[in-house]
Amino acid sequence: MITAGAIDTSRYFLPAPLTPLFHTPGYSSLTDTQRRRYNQLHGIYVNEQILFFEVALANNVLSALLRLAPPSDLASALRRFRADEAAHAAMFRELNWRCAPTIYETTDFHFVRAAGGAWRLLGAVSRRPATFPLFVWLMLMLEERALYYARETLRQRGSLAPHAVATHARHLRDEVNHVRWDQAVLDWLWPRTSQPLRRLNATLFRWMVGEFFNAPKRAALRVLDALVAEFPELEPRRGRMAAELRALGAQPAYHRFLYARDIVPRTFDRFDRWEEFASVGRVLLAYRPGAS
């Protein structure tokens, strides 16, 4: 069981619509206490997601980009970008430890899990952005979505735990620059990439988003399992709730809460510019080419 300390657990950690179970039929049958705890558990998982992204991807990609000798103004931005991401990693690591010290005393990841071989492979390819610029596209999309999360959190600050509001406010200040710098990197790097390699990267991007960054799958089910562990009376309904979570992947209405054009406008606008991404709507169901 995840326990909390020195954190206001009487409030939600995120706006409810930013959690996947909210979009399932079974959510309405949960008690207020169960909904609040689910929200908190999912909020902790989101912190893990951000930490994983910054530890496993951002530092590798940014350090490798600097070795490619970008223009001096971009190199300066990338050095600051890298320092920001290290600070964010420390912030989310400390926050999760405060939320669940018995879980995070010895590990950074409880819901997000990667086998040793997968971690090493991700590390190897993310250190080669000239060959695999798809990671810059991924950074842009995820950081735009983080902006949306932060703005929604601040918009509903009165109903949320103060620590969550403060953390997302700090994240928002830096992510505005990060989104701008991601675009600058793509404008420099993507046109320098050969068309066959661009096509390969667009294919890999679609696969990676569909497998890890789209509809609820493995980690989302672990959040559900954590909720059921704290509320054993939910055990008979666990299978149905899990099936409802998985079903969200095929529902366009749910996808509009993930990566719609008003959530990741710069990413979608750049998809429009490059023919390699014409079929990205197969996994990003809210994307339609040229629908600005």
Image (cartoon, rainbow, N blue to C red):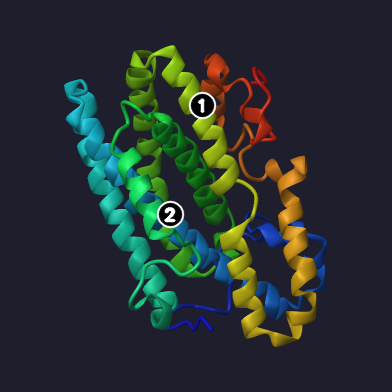
Q: Residue placed at 25% from the left, 43% from the top?
A: 82
Tell me: 282 left or right of 177: right
Residue 37 in view: no
Q: Residues within 10 Å of mark 2 (few under 14, many from 20)?
A: some
Q: Residues within 10 Å of mark 1 (few under 14, many from 20)?
A: many
Amino acid carrying label 1: it is: Ala
User: Marks 1 and 2, Cα distance to the nearest angstrom?
Assistant: 23 Å
Q: Residue placed at 27% from the left, 38% from the top?
A: 62
Amino acid carrying label 2: it is: Ile
**Residue 40 locus on image (x, y percent):** 56, 71
- Whether residue 188 is situated above or below residue 225 in the rendered picture: above
Tell me the quarter of the picture where residue 69 sits: top left
| 1 vs 2, front mark | 1
**Residue 291 locus on image (x, y percent):** 67, 20
Q: Residue placed at 52% from the left, 43% from the top?
A: 145
**Residue 245 locus on image (x, y percent):** 72, 59
Tell me the quarter of the picture where residue 188 sits: top left
Residue 32 in view: yes
Q: Of the residues under marks 1 and 2, which one precedes in the sequence? A: 2
Tell me: 11 left or right of 143: right
Tell me the quarter of the picture where residue 29 sits: bottom right
Q: Residue placed at 67% from the left, 57% from the top?
A: 20
What SS does tag 1 mark? Answer: helix
**Residue 149 locus on image (x, y percent):** 54, 50
> How many numbered circles are shown?
2
Residue named by callout 1: 202
| Mark number, residue 105 | none
Residue named by callout 2: 50
Q: Nearer the viewer, residue 113 or 70?
A: 113
Q: Nearer the viewer, residue 176 or 275?
A: 275
